[in-house]
Image (tube, rainbow, N blue to C red):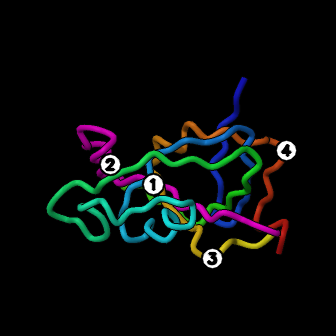
Amino acid sequence: MSKLYIPACGDRITLAQPWQFTLYLEHRNLNFAEAIGIDHSRYQNTGYAWRAPLDTVSASLPEGTVLECDRIYIRSTSKSAASAEESYDSVTWKVVINDKPSRNQRFWVKLSDCSNLEYEPDSISTYRDRK
């Protein structure tokens, strides 16, 4: 039986499997897109695209990647969203390299993409235990 784990900000997990997710090319994700080799310059609806849906790309992180939870955003009004694309619920992650969050490797993904993330249960490192 699986147990639900909701990370607190600062908690770290290690990916047990490669993780493929949808990366929204919003201004907060553009540095991360560049860091993993995605050329976002050929897309039109990036950055601050309020008039049209943001462009998205498929992105992935390899098995063994350490992620630190940086922010969890859940709106109570998301219950009325007609589809997952309309929901603002998201988790912001930082990629950790050499035990430190890496510069320009902070990104957010929709909550539905986090449901596909597989992590090593023994790899959970809580922030309060590292202080």
Residue 9: quarter of image:
bottom right
Q: What residue appears at the point 82 percent right and 75 percent down from the top-left corner?
A: 131
Q: Distance of mark 1 from mark 3, alpha carbons?
A: 20 Å
Q: Do the residues labelled 2 and 1 touch (CB within 8 Å)?
A: no
Q: Where is residue 107 in the image (x, y as percent from the top left)?
A: 51, 63
* Res 87 label: 2
Tell me the kind of residue under disc 3: Arg
Q: What residue appears at the point 85 percent right and 44 percent down from the top-left corner?
A: 122
Q: In this view, does 48 lie above or below 16?
A: below
Nearer-N-terminus badge (1/3): 1
Q: Give the range drawn in magenta.
A: 76-98
Pick the front one: 76 or 72 = 72
* Res 90 label: 1
- Disc 2, SS: loop
Number of residues whose C-alpha sits closer than 10 Å to that of mark 2, classed few (under 14), some (14–19) or many (20 or more): some
Q: Where is residue 55 in the image (x, y as percent from the top left)?
A: 30, 54
Q: Distance of mark 3 from mark 2, alpha carbons?
A: 28 Å
Q: Is residue 102 above or below residue 56?
A: below
Residue tagged 4: 122
Residue tagged 3: 103
Residue 129: quarter of image:
bottom right
Nearer-N-terminus badge (1/4): 1
Pick the front one: 58 or 108 = 58
